[in-house]
C-alpha cells in the first residue's frame, strides 16, 4: 500500500472520488497553502487568542478584532476561491465543501468562518424576502476583498443542546423589523457583518416552538454598532476563528421564514455546519496521519526508520483504511445534503435520510480526528508534546470537533429521534442494500428495530453502542461501494 496519498489533500480526494470538480481551482488553492498559507496558519495559532480593541482613541465603541495583516489575507483566500459564492452560482454545495476539506487539512479553525458564512447565506436566500435578499445576499457572495462574512449564533450561557429551555434572547416586533435583546455566549466568527441568530419571539412558549431565526447586521442604518462583543474566548485551538461573547440590546434584526418554522430553520443551519464538521474532521485526520508518516519515514530506531517496523506500519495501514471509510461516510452526508438543501418544511423522506447520515457522520468522524491526532502524537513521542511542533496542535484542534455543532450525545439522541419518528434507518438500509452483505445488513437492521422497541430509559442509556455499530456498518458499506 502506498501512503503517499496522505501527503496531499487533493491527491486523497482524487483517490476517493475519481475526479474533483474545478481541479485547477483546487490545485491553485493547495499550492497557495503550501507556498504561503501554512506559515501564516502556524504563526496565527502560536500567537494565541486575538486581541479585542473595544474603543477607538475618542472612546467610541468599535469592537475591532485584531489579527496580523497576513491572517486577513489567508482568510480572504478561501472566499475568493469560492467557499460561499460557488454554492449559489453553481447550485451545488460540493465545490464549497471540497474547498473546505482543503482548508481544514491546513487549518481546521479557518473552515469555521467559511461554513458559518455559507450557513448565513443559505437561509437568507431561501427564507428572506426579496428586499432583504437584494440588500444583503450580494455582500456575502462577493469575490473580492469587500466580501462580507456571516456567523451562526445559537448558544447561550445555559448550553447549546437544549435550545428550547436556554435561549433567553427575546425578539420584539418593531415595524418592518425586530429588536433583539439578550446574550450569545459562544459566538464563533464574532465581528461578522451578518449573523443568523436564534431568539424567542415575545410572548411565545418557553420551548423550541417559540424560537425564530433572525438575520442580524453588524451595523445599524445610522452606522452605529448593532451588537457588542464582550470578549474573545481563550480556546485551546481553532484560534483562526475568533469566538466571542456577544451582547444584544435592542439590536435590529429581520425574521427569516414563517414564525412557526423557526426551529426547523435553526436545525437547517446547524446541519450545514455538521456536515462541514464531518468533512473537516476527516481532513484533520488525514493531516495527522500525514505528519505521522513524514516523521516515521525519517525517525530511525533500532537500525531502521520506524515506519519499517511491522507494528507501526500495520497501525498506519489500519488507520489509512479507517480514514477512507470515514471519508465515505462524510461524503455521503454531503451528497445527500446537496440533494435536499433547497427543501423547506415539510421535508421529504430524502431529507430525513440525510439527517440520520449527518448525525452518524458527525459522531463518527469527530472521534476519528481525535484518535488520529492522538496517535500522531504517540508516533512523535516526546517531540509530539512540544508546542514548537505541530503534533500537539492537531490534538488541540481535534478535541474541539466532537463539541462543535452538537456533542456526541446530541448526535446519538437526534439520530434515535429521526429513526423513531421518520423511519430513517429503513431508508438508509434500502440505500445500502445493493452493496452490503445481506446477512450483515439483516443483523444490523434487526438490532436497530429491537433497540427502538426498548423502554425509553433503556433505549437512551444503551444507545451509543448501537449508534457506533450503525456508523461503522454504514461507513464500511459506503467505502466498499467504490
Image (tube, rainbow, N blue to C red):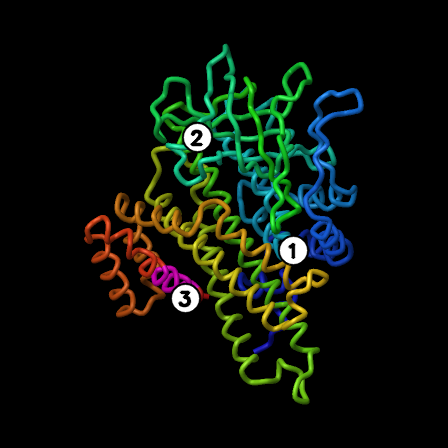
Q: Closer to the N terminus: mark 1 or mark 3?
A: 1
Spot occupied by residue 191 in the image (x, y as percentages of width and height): 65, 32
Residue under the point 60% across and 40% down: 243
Q: CA distance from mark 3 to mark 2?
A: 39 Å
Q: Quadrant of residue 9?
A: bottom right
Is residue 384 shown in magenta? no
- Magenta portion: prevailing SS class: helix
Q: Closer to the N terminus: mark 1 or mark 2?
A: 1
Badge 1 element: helix
Q: Closer to the N terminus: mark 3 or mark 2?
A: 2
Write down the residue under mark 3. Answer: 476
Badge 3 element: helix
Q: CA distance from mark 1 to mark 3?
A: 27 Å
Spot occupied by residue 409 in the image (x, y as percentages of width and height): 39, 50
Badge 2 element: loop
Q: Nearer the viewer, mark 3 or mark 2?
A: 2
181, above or below 10, in the image? above
Residue under the point 40% across and 23% down: 259
Between 250 and 217, the one nearer to me in the picture:
250
Q: Residues within 10 Å of mark 2 (few under 14, many from 20)?
A: many
Q: Quadrant of residue 307?
A: bottom right
464, above or below 170, in the image? below
81 displayed left or right of 185: right
Which of the numbered marks, if any, corresponds to residue 167?
2
163 displayed left or right of 454: right
Write down the residue under mark 1. Answer: 23
306, above or below 81, in the image? below
Q: Residues within 10 Å of mark 3 (few under 14, many from 20)?
A: many
Q: Quadrant of residue 39?
A: bottom right
First to last magenta residue range: 468-478
Amino acid at each position: 500500500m502506498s501512503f503517499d496519498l496522505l501527503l496531499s489533500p487533493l491527491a486523497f480526494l482524487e483517490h476517493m472520488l475519481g475526479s474533483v470538480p474545478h481541479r485547477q481551482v483546487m490545485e491553485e488553492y493547495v499550492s497557495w497553502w503550501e507556498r504561503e498559507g501554512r506559515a501564516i496558519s502556524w504563526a496565527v495559532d502560536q500567537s494565541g487568542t486575538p486581541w479585542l480593541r473595544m474603543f477607538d482613541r475618542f472612546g467610541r465603541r468599535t469592537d475591532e478584532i485584531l489579527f496580523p495583516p497576513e491572517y486577513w489575507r489567508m482568510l480572504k483566500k478561501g472566499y475568493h476561491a469560492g467557499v460561499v459564492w460557488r454554492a449559489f452560482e453553481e447550485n451545488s454545495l460540493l465545490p464549497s465543501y471540497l474547498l473546505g476539506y482543503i482548508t481544514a487539512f491546513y487549518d481546521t479553525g479557518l473552515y469555521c468562518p467559511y461554513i458559518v458564512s455559507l450557513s448565513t447565506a443559505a437561509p437568507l436566500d431561501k427564507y428572506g424576502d426579496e428586499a432583504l435578499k437584494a440588500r444583503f445576499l450580494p455582500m456575502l457572495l462577493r469575490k473580492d476583498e469587500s466580501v462580507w462574512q456571516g456567523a451562526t449564533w445559537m448558544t447561550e450561557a445555559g448550553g447549546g443542546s437544549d435550545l428550547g429551555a436556554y435561549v433567553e434572547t427575546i425578539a420584539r416586533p418593531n415595524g418592518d423589523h425586530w429588536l433583539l435583546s439578550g446574550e450569545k455566549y459562544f459566538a464563533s466568527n464574532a465581528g461578522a457583518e451578518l449573523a443568523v441568530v436564534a431568539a424567542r419571539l415575545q410572548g411565545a412558549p418557553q420551548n423550541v416552538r417559540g424560537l425564530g431565526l433572525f438575520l442580524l447586521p453588524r451595523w445599524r442604518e445610522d452606522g452605529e454598532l448593532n451588537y457588542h462583543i464582550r470578549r474573545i474566548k481563550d480556546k485551546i485551538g481553532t484560534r483562526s476563528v475568533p469566538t466571542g461573547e456577544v451582547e444584544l440590546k435592542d439590536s435590529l434584526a429581520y425574521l427569516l421564514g414563517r414564525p412557526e418554522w423557526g426551529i426547523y430553520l435553526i436545525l437547517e443551519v446547524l446541519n450545514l455546519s455538521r456536515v462541514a464538521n464531518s468533512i473537516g474532521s476527516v481532513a484533520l485526520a488525514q493531516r495527522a496521519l500525514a505528519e505521522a508518516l513524514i516523521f516515521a519515514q525519517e525517525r530511525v530506531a533500532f537500525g531502521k526508520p520506524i515506519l519499517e517496523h511491522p507494528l507501526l506500519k500495520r497501525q498506519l495501514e489500519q488507520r489509512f483504511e479507517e480514514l477512507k471509510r470515514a471519508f465515505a461516510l462524510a461524503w455521503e452526508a454531503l451528497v445527500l445534503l446537496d440533494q435536499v438543501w433547497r427543501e423547506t418544511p415539510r421535508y421529504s423522506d430524502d431529507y430525513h435520510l440525510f439527517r440520520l447520515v449527518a448525525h452518524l457522520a458527525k459522531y463518527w468522524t469527530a472521534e476519528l480526528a481525535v484518535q488520529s491526532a492522538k496517535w500522531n502524537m504517540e508516533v512523535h513521542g516526546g517531540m509530539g508534546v512540544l508546542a514548537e511542533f505541530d503534533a500537539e496542535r492537531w490534538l488541540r484542534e481535534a478535541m474541539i470537533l466532537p463539541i462543535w455543532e452538537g456533542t456526541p450525545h446530541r448526535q446519538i439522541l437526534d439520530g434515535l429521534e429521526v429513526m423513531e419518528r421518520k423511519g430513517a434507518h429503513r431508508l438508509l438500509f434500502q440505500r445500502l442494500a445493493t452493496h452490503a452483505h445481506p446477512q450483515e445488513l439483516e443483523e444490523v437492521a434487526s438490532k436497530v428495530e429491537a433497540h427502538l422497541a426498548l423502554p425509553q430509559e433503556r433505549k437512551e442509556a444503551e444507545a451509543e453502542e448501537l449508534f457506533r455499530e450503525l456508523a461503522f456498518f454504514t461507513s464500511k458499506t459506503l467505502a466498499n461501494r467504490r
